[in-house]
Amino acid sequence: MRALTVTPLRAGTAEVRELPDPVPDEGELLVEGLALGICGTDREIASGAYGWAPPGRDHLVLGHESLGRVRSAPDGSGFSAGDLVVGVVRRPDPVPCGACARGEFDMCRNGRYTERGIKQLDGYGSRLWTVEPSYAVLLDPRLEHVGVLMEPATVVAKAWEQVDRVGARAWFEPRRVLVTGAGPIGLLAALLGVQRGLEVHVLDLATGGPKPRAVRELGAEYHSAGAGEVTERVEPDIIIEATGASRVVFEVMAGTAPYGIVCLTGVSPVGRRISVDVGAANREIVLENDVVVGSVNANLRHYATAADALAEADPDWLSRLITRRVPLERFTEALTADPDDIKVVLTLD
């Protein structure tokens, strides 16, 4: 079979190579790969920034944003040939820590978890892959062309869950949410905000292209002004930060309504210095009972929530988030970001 592989920590090693067809272990599903979403994590691994090959190997099959169709499934697995599925990314550590032992492997305490396509487990960037039924998620058949958005949707499903849990420490009836960043994470976060009946605002630098249109078609309001100006005007109860841009992060932290919650989902690059009035930020957070919380990855509960959210969404709107579909053989194009990209997808058939 063809697979997209990389030698971790070595730039320029990404290639499509022929590998033996996988043979499912007892109880596993054999899945025909349909599509693979590409994100910043994949590009960083391909650049040699990080990544871990499976033990005893020098190469890793890339890809964690999966979409496939079951080719064979064991009796009693809950799946049948032809089912549309995605594979969960993370697996709990073998010790396990207290969080992993309770199914909260997205909150692993000791870092011994593994991840498909990232850390010590082959990813989903191949024509065929196998997965345990307990780490496969069934999708609505109507999502065949957009189901590859499932993994980023799980990230925002968890982010919203974190917001709910923090808000529940006292009376909490939010009305307005600001999402910073109109990439796939930001737009899917906005989708879940609309589904919750909130007044949704999205901030991004783009003034043209597909992002403003996607926001407007969602029924949300698009902004391209500075973060401070927008937060002052909107006074959001909730901010989902999806840019990872250091200056934006600190500007929005000071821009919520009282009892505001900022959930950080974007990862900031290191080494960029900015001047920040930490005292003012601390004063505002303390005196207004604000909270800033980080959120990453997802567990099985978030996958179920994301599957429901995508099934409820307009498939035509979801399809517009996929701005490029690239054949596997032209993977270098997919690994090169374009300013107008929302989501780039590799087709595996």
Image (spheres, rainbow, N blue to C red):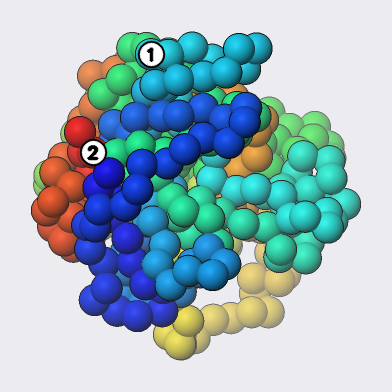
Seen from the viewer's position, the closer of residues 204 and 105 is 105
Indicate left or right for 267 with 172 as reference: left
Seen from the viewer's position, the closer of residues 165 and 172 is 165
Percent of width and height locating residue 48: 36, 77
Indicate left or right for 234 with 19 as reference: right
Question: Where's the C terminus, which quadrant?
Answer: top left
Q: Which residue is mark 1?
A: 82
Which numbered disc covers residue 348? Answer: 2
The residue located at (57%, 18%) in the rendering is 74
Q: Is residue 265 visible?
A: no
The residue located at (27%, 73%) in the rendering is 13
Seen from the viewer's position, the closer of residues 228 and 93 is 93
Q: CA distance from mark 1 to mark 2?
A: 16 Å
Which three-letter amino acid code belongs to the residue tagged 2? Leu
Badge 1: few (under 14), some or many (20 or more) residues near its Cα, within 10 Å?
some
Percent of width and height locating residue 253: 57, 61
Indicate left or right for 140 with 119 as reference: left
**The residue tagged with tag 1: helix, strand or loop?**
loop
Q: Identify whether 184 is placed above or below 229.
A: above
Percent of width and height locating residue 99: 82, 49
Which numbered disc covers residue 141? Answer: none
The residue located at (61%, 52%) in the rendering is 295
Which three-letter amino acid code belongs to the residue tagged 1? Gly
Name the image quarter holding residue 60: bottom left
Question: Where's the N terminus, which quadrant?
Answer: top left
Percent of width and height locating residue 244: 44, 64
The residue located at (37%, 56%) in the rendering is 62
